[in-house]
Amino acid sequence: MSILVDASTRLLVQGITGREGSFHATQMVEYGTNVVGGVTPGGRGKTVAGAPVFDTVADAVKETGANVSIIYVPARFAPDAIYEAVDAGIPLVVCITEGIPVNDMVPVYAHVKASGARLIGPNCPGLITPGQAKVGIMPGFIHAEGPVGLVSRSGTLTYEVVDALTRAGLGQSTALGIGGDPVIGTSFVDALGLFEADPATEAIVIIGEIGGSDEEDAARYIAEHVTKPVVGFIAGRTAPPGKRMGHAGAIISGGSGTAAEKISALEAAGVRVAESPYQVPGLLQAALAG
Amino acid sequence: MSILVDASTRLLVQGITGREGSFHATQMVEYGTNVVGGVTPGGRGKTVAGAPVFDTVADAVKETGANVSIIYVPARFAPDAIYEAVDAGIPLVVCITEGIPVNDMVPVYAHVKASGARLIGPNCPGLITPGQAKVGIMPGFIHAEGPVGLVSRSGTLTYEVVDALTRAGLGQSTALGIGGDPVIGTSFVDALGLFEADPATEAIVIIGEIGGSDEEDAARYIAEHVTKPVVGFIAGRTAPPGKRMGHAGAIISGGSGTAAEKISALEAAGVRVAESPYQVPGLLQAALAG
Amino acid sequence: MNVHEYQAAEVLAAHGIPVNAGQVATTPDEAERIARDLGSGVVAIKAQVHTGGRGKAGGIKLARSPQEARDAAAAILGMDIRGHTVRKVLVVPGADIAQEFYLGVVLDRPNRRTLVMASGEGGVDIEEVARERPERIHRQLADPVLGLHAYQARQLGFALGLPADKVNGFAAIAQRLYATYAAEDASLAEINPLVLTGAGDWLALDAKMSFDDNALFRHPSIEALRDPDEENATELEARRGGISFVKLDGDIGCIVNGAGLAMATMDAVKLHGGEPANFLDVGGGASADQVARAFGLVTADPAVRAILINIFGGITRGDVVAQGIREALGRVNVAVPIVVRLSGTNAEEGRRLLAEAGLTAVDTMDEAAAQVVRSAVA
Amino acid sequence: MNVHEYQAAEVLAAHGIPVNAGQVATTPDEAERIARDLGSGVVAIKAQVHTGGRGKAGGIKLARSPQEARDAAAAILGMDIRGHTVRKVLVVPGADIAQEFYLGVVLDRPNRRTLVMASGEGGVDIEEVARERPERIHRQLADPVLGLHAYQARQLGFALGLPADKVNGFAAIAQRLYATYAAEDASLAEINPLVLTGAGDWLALDAKMSFDDNALFRHPSIEALRDPDEENATELEARRGGISFVKLDGDIGCIVNGAGLAMATMDAVKLHGGEPANFLDVGGGASADQVARAFGLVTADPAVRAILINIFGGITRGDVVAQGIREALGRVNVAVPIVVRLSGTNAEEGRRLLAEAGLTAVDTMDEAAAQVVRSAVA
């Protein structure tokens, strides 16, 4: 078991003929993901990573029965790609693209919600259920099957934690990067709810960072709804206020969104918060032990 | 029993200090409708037809517990009034206003649907449940309590039929004018579903006119879902193509939307279609008898 | 409100759609001069009238020289097409057409959304295509708020079977046509045919637009396109007075309160063997002013041989309406028989007042219709 | 991207918001001339810097004469406010303030919608009001597609307790401020204070706007407002090279792939007793070019005493990254100690390549952080 993606995933790659799209389509196929097709307007008849290319998502869904889509198109075309995927009835859309204007994402988010679909990202590494499906850009080999559900706003920092977990013998049910933008489709709370409900997940790791209040919302949710042990890490203790730290959403503004606030909120909800990514496996083992 | 409005209706009048609003608020109160308040921005503290005036619908709902709103504001402000009512949580909004641009109503319609509220109109006379609540501009005295549910795209033509029904001893459960515009909140099909489910309604009268295909949709719905006898009348047999007949929606365009098409669709669905409004009571009596 | 082809093309061009640029002539001389200015090559001379079927009626001609353009304009100007007199012709350069398409935007009433339609059968009557080969028309419902997405516009292009390198150009035009429709509050925006030229460019070769009367208040530049020659003078006058009026071919004038009732009244006249001369809705109040105005509109038609006034007194009292009719008759001279049907509140009192004034006043619409038909043939 | 008050006011004015029109001076002479042109009466001289707290820092002064304006400008120009040197002052006429309000538009992250806020506590620090008297801030979430409805704008006006005849004027400004935010892809649009003058007119007395960097590509007129004097030259250069860079106060330079990991690296440096000199995310690939560019950015800071390179090789292979670092060091002269942490794919091979080049290469971030701190103090 796992959340969101698994062996039944039939993946469509939007922007598959692009540099990023074709590279990662190949990587995902090599990992064992069932990539059933790709979409590039005007690309019909081509084949990338063994998958047939279609002109439109509607065509691709009709021909392949795709049930997940991953988007690798440039920022100014990405909102249209999300609308296309959602309107074609794809229930899970993962948007890797970085740099989408916030004002474009506000209506996208509302439309996705109203349509009953789920969006992950944008500006995220995607998600992986080890041994079953990799839907993203993370290095597959660092992952291992296991009982830890991981959710993170970050990319390489997540790999760092996953790597530490795997080395400590703690495999992952699913590892999910929700993205570093201010407006993202799936929040910590959403992911926590899915992990809580997933029988294969025995413990949860949450990796947050400065900016916004999704970690505080997560803390409230954990206190009320999560029975499984949760270990956390928050990046950006040393980040200054008023400056975006790489991610569009990683900014302390108006004095709120600091790491200290997030850490204390999580700790108050019973989450064990690591000071360094390397402490995560140990805290997790302690939590699982009792 | 009845549909949509009854003795439990707590009515708010938007635009209550205007000429139309204040006149009809008084008329509705005289009929016995429970008018709990009115809204006119800047009107707080005033009283019209015995009802307190509020600045905003939100205030009015909070203070009065209004559950139906009727709108008498000019066309260019009416969409905002509908959004305000729906966003304030009012589940039933009746818009009398005529002349709202179609392109304004398209997003209004989508928003109302998404909000789970119901809009009646615009460009409609409203609705009445005789003896309980009049929410509209129809002359109350021509109505009588009884078993006939009536739904119509027209105003005075409806009064004509209601008058004939009442004179023939056939009272009405609820009489509902859905409006003459191309984009209206409640369709014939919606109203038919409500009448079919209403135990107090024993027979249904549907009064259509040229333009669009709501009557054809109604015919299909009747054939599949309506068990009660239905009598119809369609205005505009003599209307020429390509000309709007008063109502913005009453136009035969591209050769479709003719009275003949609508009559034959209704007849094929088992509806008895009158040639003159005066035949309606007789057909109804025949239908009820057998 | 309808506009001419050349006006529609100007509106589309203002929204970035490539149109076949031409000029309007009102005389053969002008047409000749325009053809000369356009240089060598074929020109098309197209009647500018607010009706379809110009081609079949001979209202579109090709000319191979300025002289031929002059002759063609002379033949077309003054022509009657479906009751419309041709007063202007559009002179446009001939286009090198490789492929023709249809592209249109209109309200989809059942879905309460805006519909964008495209077809490979361009240049022909789209309603005929819709009836006979509906599968040849491709449709996309625009999002009610977000409009026509780029992906939807492309989807139409792919459905047309366009080669990959032509899809984006087509999609841009489809999105612009939608944007024009939305921005200008159109009720119809149509390019038929939209052509792909031999050089591979897109060109709107013919355009048709009509506009939502209820939204004209916020589009003065569209209102300014109104051509009074193309509108029925009586209908125009009626609109100014807040009356809905449509001229018909019969001889029974109708004055009614309410649009639905007005249609039902026309139907009743027909049912009793008469032919209505008009549709007329005086609106809610039926005041003396409105009734007087209505008399003026109806009696302006020399074919009218009798008038039926049908008023259902609801909120408005019947005696007040009767008083209004009497007053109106004091101001307007009506030479034909009048039958008044007055029902509803205080209707009896109203009918008594009308009878006093020598008018036939009855209780039901059917009775009134029967009587007015008799008066007309009398 | 931030802009100056006077630029924000220009943007608001272009969207129909009444602002207090003034002019910018870069010298006391200019300030005097502008004050003279503005005529008699009080003028305000306001420092134009990309930071708050100007008032408290003495960056805003009133002047009763052109001479006083000159003196005030002389005092303010060149002043340092929170690390920003004042290079421009805005000279505006004094306003007759009857009442002050706050009006702001910003993204509401938890709701993923745009939030419009209004408060009767204008002219003061709104964050303080939010903390201490949250009930004094009135909020409306705009519809994600339809925007701020007129009724919502009015609702804010009524919540402020405005008299009925002032509500529409306020609502119009609120809708325009929302429209400005949306049309220009702002991330903040704030009027503080928005004032009602003695004559009963609305006036935006101070304005603040910042813009979404990701949307600047479609707003060249906003991009043109960028003031290079107000931006850290290194940060600007970094952005051009596709690198995220933020200058900090410490002495350990950081070069990391990934924003989250870059923050975690800074935190690790701090945890081991060091102070990071910067945040730096080289982006995904960590190619030789990017690493060379990163070295350039980090070594531009004379405070840097050691550099920590932290790369988690995911898709990118560790040996390729190591090769890149070696190449980069061949191009850029780095005089301070470098500690490289390289992990992930082919990391061992990578560390071997680095060791060959005489670099300290370790396996974990904590180890690297500890070592770099030691190198810096050495």
Image (cartoon, coloured by chain):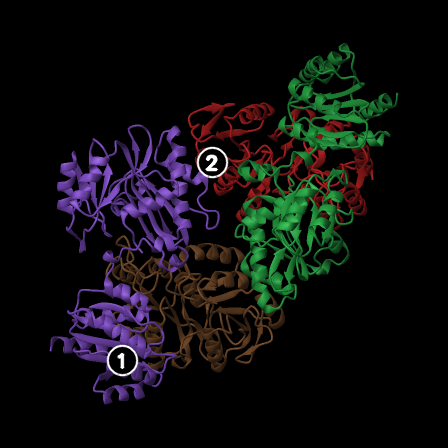
Chain colours: A red, B brown, C purple, D green
Query: Disc 1 residue type?
Result: Ala
Identify the disc placed on residue C328: 1
Q: Quadrant of residue D377?
A: top right
Left or right of A77 on screen, residue B228: left
Residue shown at 58% from the left, 53% from the top: D142
Is residue C144 at all visible to an observer of this figure? Answer: yes
Q: Quadrant of residue D320?
A: top right
Is residue B89 at all visible to an observer of this figure? Answer: no
Q: Chain of mark 1?
A: C
The crowding category of the residue bearing disc 2, from other C-alpha atoms within 10 Å (few below 14, some 14 to 19, many at least 20), is many
Residue shown at 15% from the left, 46% from the top: C76
Left or right of B112 on screen, residue C63: left
Q: Quadrant of the N terminus of chain D?
A: top right
Along the line of sight, the residue nearer the viewer: C32 or A90: C32
| Residue that label 2 marks | A57
Judge whether C285 appears above or below D279 on screen: below
Identify the disc placed on residue C92: none
Query: Disc 2 residue type?
Result: Val
Q: Position of residue D237 (x, y in %)?
A: 66, 27
Left or right of B248 on screen, residue D95: right
Judge whether A101 appears above or below B191 on screen: above
